[in-house]
Amino acid sequence: MDYKKYNDYELIYMVRENDGTSRDILYEKYLPVLKSIAMEFYQRYKFYGFEYEDFLQEAYISFEKAILQYHDNRGTIFYTFVDLCIRRGMITFCRNISNSNKNKPYYFFIDLDDKAIPDYRNDINDYNLEYDFRKVFNILKLKLPLELSSILELRINGFNYSEISKLLTVPCSTVDYRMKKIKEEFTKYYCK
């Protein structure tokens, strides 16, 4: 179909007048843009368990909003406005799905305390993942000074900061600081 003979502004006007054919032409014309932006965000956020169709659906919703909210008297080209609206809609969608309080990505994370360190070296299909982690963990435990390795050992066994503070007779702030040092060392060693 030759889209050059269709003017976006006329199509938008007809869509607002409830012309279904104009809506179909406009959707068909901008479908490659919708798919491209949806694929771009899907590639970045697919690890949160959503399908490409979910991202495409969000792009459709944002496109519909762009049609309804566009005003040609503001000096903006419709394509630019559509691109901006879809990207904003996708950013909002991705922000919601990646909210750490609600969703966690399903690829492998090594969780030390409440902060997760992604493992970029291993594939999710690697069955030696647990063994590899344990091996690195044991090596790191031996390399750390006693004041750090004792906190790490207690933390791994389920003790919280206040319990560790009482057991080792150090302030909670010291426990927190030493856990940060442990995380830095672990990240340096394991996430190469």
Image (tube, rainbow, N blue to C red):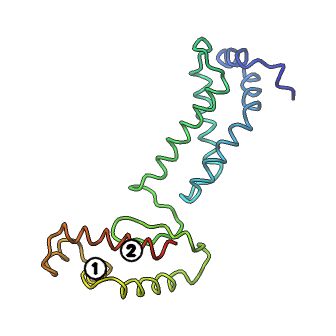
144 left or right, relative to 190? left
Q: Position of residue 100 (x, y in %)?
A: 41, 56
Q: Pick the residue in front: 72 or 96.
A: 72
| Disc 1 residue crowd, few under 14, some 14–19, many 20+, Cα 10 Å | some
Mark 2 element type = helix
Q: Is 20 drawn above or below residue 144 in the view shown?
A: above
96 left or right, relative to 170? right
Mark 1 element type = helix
Residue at mark 1: 148
Residue 160 location, quadrant: bottom left
Q: Looking at this rendering, what residue extends furthest in the top direction?
A: 73
Q: Position of residue 108 (x, y in %)?
A: 51, 70
- Quadrant location of the N terminus in the rendered image: top right
Q: Across the whole image, how many numbered discs are drawn on residues?
A: 2
Q: Position of residue 103 (x, y in %)?
A: 45, 57
Marked residue nearer the N-terminal end (1 or 2): 1
Q: Pick the residue in front: 51 or 36.
A: 36
Q: Position of residue 62 (x, y in %)?
A: 58, 33
Q: Is 72 drawn above or below residue 144 in the view shown?
A: above
Q: Looking at this rendering, what residue extends furthest in the right direction?
A: 1
Q: Amino acid at mark 1?
A: Leu
Labelled pair 1, 2 in contact (Cβ < 8 Å): yes
Q: Is 24 drawn above or below residue 149 in the view shown?
A: above
Residue at mark 2: 185
Q: Amino acid at mark 2?
A: Glu
